[in-house]
Image (cartoon, rainbow, N blue to C red):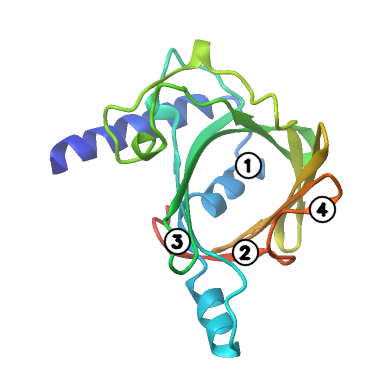
Amino acid sequence: MKTAKKLIWLFSLFMTMQAYAQIPDNHPIHLFQTYITGDFDNQRQIDAELKAGKQVHPYAKHVNRVANGKIDNLPAQLNGFFLLEESYYKYAEADTIIKPYLFFFEALPEGKVKLYSMQLPKDVPPKDIRNDNASLRFDYQALKPSPSFKPAVYTQTDRGFYIKAPNEFPGGVFTLEETIGKDRLEVMELLVRDGKQITPYDTPIIYERIGGKQ
């Protein structure tokens, strides 16, 4: 089993190196990848909230890995990288919510990074869309951007990479606002429907790295 996992990791690394062949070594997307790849949770934030007397945010965990090695028919030259994000959310006395995502991050001129959210196969249960699932495969030729999330651009700041991306839909708007920094992700996903805020909190979830650093 360890040998199989090592071979999968080596193949993923090879595919990532091939995909990066045309991206300049000094492009910020390389730093961005090290920031966003790994395991993160907001346990410190939850502990502080409980100590203050009220839990505001759900316990949240991200397991993020470069996913180029899981994608068949990947072009030899690709101006960016795919990332599989496993998202887990849990409030006290509630079942864990599992939300996997497949993202593509594109290197743009002037040091910016463009985010695309991809559609996931409908015939694969969310619980099976995991980085440690060796049988999980995607076909590059079948991948399509999500119609519900417009591509958006990260800009590098002194705190990391910042994005604010509003996405309107009939009767509402979903806004992603986040800062991707060294060992820390600040993520606010605000959903408003029919003029009413659906997201039960007003401040970002603060993720800190707990493992998986590259």
- Of circles 4 and 2, which is in front? 4
Q: Earlier in the sequence, mark 2 or mark 1?
A: 1
In this rendering, position of residue 171 left or right of residue 154: right
Q: Which mark is residue 196?
A: 4
Q: Earlier in the sequence, mark 4 or mark 1?
A: 1
Q: Earlier in the sequence, mark 4 or mark 2?
A: 4
Secondary structure state at the residue bearing disc 4:
strand
- Of circles 1 and 3, which is in front? 3
The spot of residue 84 in percent (x, y) is 47, 38
Q: Which of these two is toward me, 96 or 145?
A: 96
- Of circles 4 and 1, which is in front? 4
Q: Are marks 2 and 1 in contact (CB under 8 Å)?
A: no
The answer to which image quadrant residue 135 occupies is top left
Residue type pointed to by label 2: Ile
Q: Which mark is residue 15?
A: none
In this rendering, position of residue 142 left or right of residue 150: left
Indicate whether 167 appears above or below 212: above
**Disc 2 target residue:** 205
Rounded to the nearest angstrom, the CA distance separating label 4 from label 1 is 36 Å
**Disc 3 target residue:** 94
In this rendering, position of residue 111 left or right of residue 87: right
Q: Which of these two is toward me, 62 or 65?
A: 62
The residue at the point 81 percent across, 40 percent down is 172
Secondary structure state at the residue bearing disc 1:
helix
The residue at the point 80 percent across, 42 percent down is 173
